[in-house]
Amino acid sequence: MEYWDEAATFLSKQDETLRRLIERHAGERLSGSGDAFSTLANAIVGQQISVAAASGIWKRFSQRFPGIFPTDIINSNLDDLRSCGLSMRKAEYLLGIARSFAGGELTDAEFDHWSDDEVRDRLCALRGVGPWTAEMFLIFHLRRPDILPLGDIGLHRAARRLYLWPEGESLDETRRRLTELAETWRPWRTVAVWYLWRDLDAEPVIY
């Protein structure tokens, strides 16, 4: 990403905590799982479960459907999808999204021309896609530089630990603190968020 080094330099000057993280993880940067459909599928898998659990399911899913092609998903059945560790609901979501891509309702190219809000609105019209999933798509597939996924629990955990915020405070309070802090990260909130995530897990988060 052409903006990563510029963003890291800016954030290092703005935020002492981020400066330490950027130095600790020097040479690393965000990467995604591939095309638009793969990224959405990966994010669906990761909804409301731990990074470790999602990684295991995604590994089985990738082995069962090499290449993660929408047509392969459509030609499978719910039992095939559930054998990877997916819930019935997530299996249904993936089938629906695969049909949208295979039928041409969604294409890789069209997202490039839409604003962040337009992408959110279009994706959230799909069954099973909410704001968090749309934001993972904006970050990991479109690499939009200024996304703040306030609904991400991992981000809340990382921020509480790194900025020494009270562990017992409400999600609303953590969200308020994050919103305020992230104003100092603009226009590179995606990069700041990635470094907070990176310091939380042994392996980089990928969707």
Image (cartoon, grey):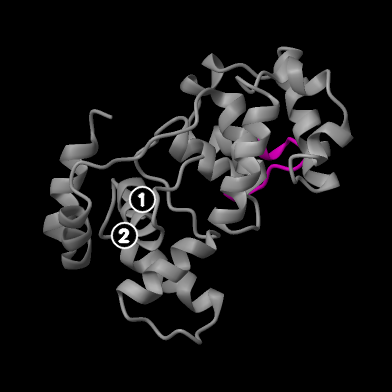
Q: Locate residue 10, reporting x and y percent.
A: 15, 49
Q: Secondary structure at mark 2?
A: loop
Q: Residue at x 36, y 50 (%)?
A: 194
Q: Residue at x 21, y 67 (%)?
A: 17
Q: Is residue 125 magenta?
A: yes
Q: Nearer the viewer, residue 70 or 121?
A: 70
Position of 20 with respect to 79 (left or right) is: left
Above or below — where is 127 with respect to 114? Answer: below
Within-10-Å neighbours for mark 1: few <14, some 14–19, many 20+ = many
Label placed on residue 183 = 2
Position of 141 with respect to 48 (left or right) is: left
Q: Nearer the viewer, residue 120 or 19?
A: 19
The amino acid type found where label 1 is placed reads Trp
Q: Please tell me how many numbered marks the rendered image carries.
A: 2
Q: Secondary structure at mark 1?
A: helix
Q: Residue at x 61, y 54 (%)?
A: 53
Q: Which image quarter is the N terminus in? A: top left
Within-10-Å neighbours for mark 2: few <14, some 14–19, many 20+ = few
Above or below — where is 84 with respect to 36? Answer: below
Which stretch is magenta?
122-132
Q: Locate residue 58, reporting x and y percent.
A: 62, 40
The amino acid type found where label 2 is placed reads Glu
Q: Locate residue 128, reporting x and y percent.
A: 75, 43
Position of 104 with respect to 7 (left or right) is: right
Spatial distance from mark 1 to mark 2, Cα to Cα?
16 Å
Question: Can residue 121 be seen in this snapshot?
Answer: no
Question: Can residue 170 be seen in this snapshot?
Answer: yes
Q: Nearer the viewer, mark 1 or mark 2?
A: 1
Circle 1 is placed at which residue position? 194
Are dots 1 and 2 in contact, CB under 8 Å? no
- Residue 106, image quadrant: top right
